[in-house]
Image (cartoon, rainbow, N blue to C red):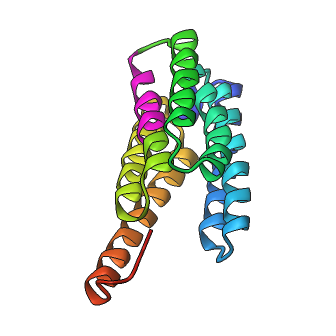
Amino acid sequence: MLADMTLSEMAGQVVGLIALGFCIAGFASTRDERLMGLLIGANVAFATQYALFQSWTAAALTVLVIVRIGLARRFLGSVPVMMGMLAVSAVAVVLTWQRWIDVFPTTAMLLGTIGMFMLRGIPMRLFLAGAGLAWMANNIAIGSIGATLAEGLVVVTNLVTIVRLSRMKRRYPDLDLS
């Protein structure tokens, strides 16, 4: 596998592993601010990796994911801001679409945007798990080992959190988990 890779693709593998490191450090953190900062760092690494793999739709949408994180935190529940984010994402997809694989990052961006702007608690995490699975499919399709492992970590962590929230909701039905 490595013997068939270009120098750019090998560099992409290294950057994908760096993104994995950011994800592990982020999810190990108990501080939300640190988590967000590390996730932004991971997405910078992901965008760089996608560019090295010449996966331009994934690279462009990953840059927009960084913007989305900030906007969703500031404008939670804002349909106009969410629609603006989706419109900008659609323009990016139209300008960068190369092949059928680009359906994966497009799906991930759609699910992640709706989840982050409009949902909270378990429903949000279900949408984000779906987005993670779409990113994982993209990473498998382009052959990125580090990014595939990183998204697998994100999906598993998300599913474990969903189970924990479900148990808390059953144990404490009046508890607001949003």
How many numbered markers are drawn?
Answer: 0
At 29% from the left and 89% from the top, the residue drawn is 171
At 58% from the left and 18% from the top, the residue drawn is 92
Residue 143's place in the image compared with 146, above or below, is above
The image quarter in which residue 52 lies: top right
138 left or right, relative to 39: left
Residue 106's place in the image compared with 19, above or below, is above
Task: Please identify the quadrant where the C terminus is shown.
Answer: bottom left
Residue 130: image location, x then y, percent: 36, 47
Q: Is residue 55 visible?
A: no
Residue 159: image location, x then y, percent: 36, 65
At 41% from the left and 55% from the top, the residue drawn is 124
Q: Is residue 20 visible?
A: yes
Seen from the viewer's position, the closer of residues 132 and 167 is: 167
71 left or right, relative to 58: right
Residue 5: image location, x then y, percent: 60, 27
Which contiguous range is marked in magenta? 100-111
Seen from the viewer's position, the closer of residues 51 and 29 is: 29
Outermost residue toward the bottom?
171
Residue 60: image location, x then y, percent: 63, 25
Q: Main secondary structure of the magenta part?
A: helix
Find out whether residue 104 is within the magenta segment: yes
At 62% from the left and 73% from the top, the residue drawn is 28
Find out whether residue 5 is within the magenta segment: no
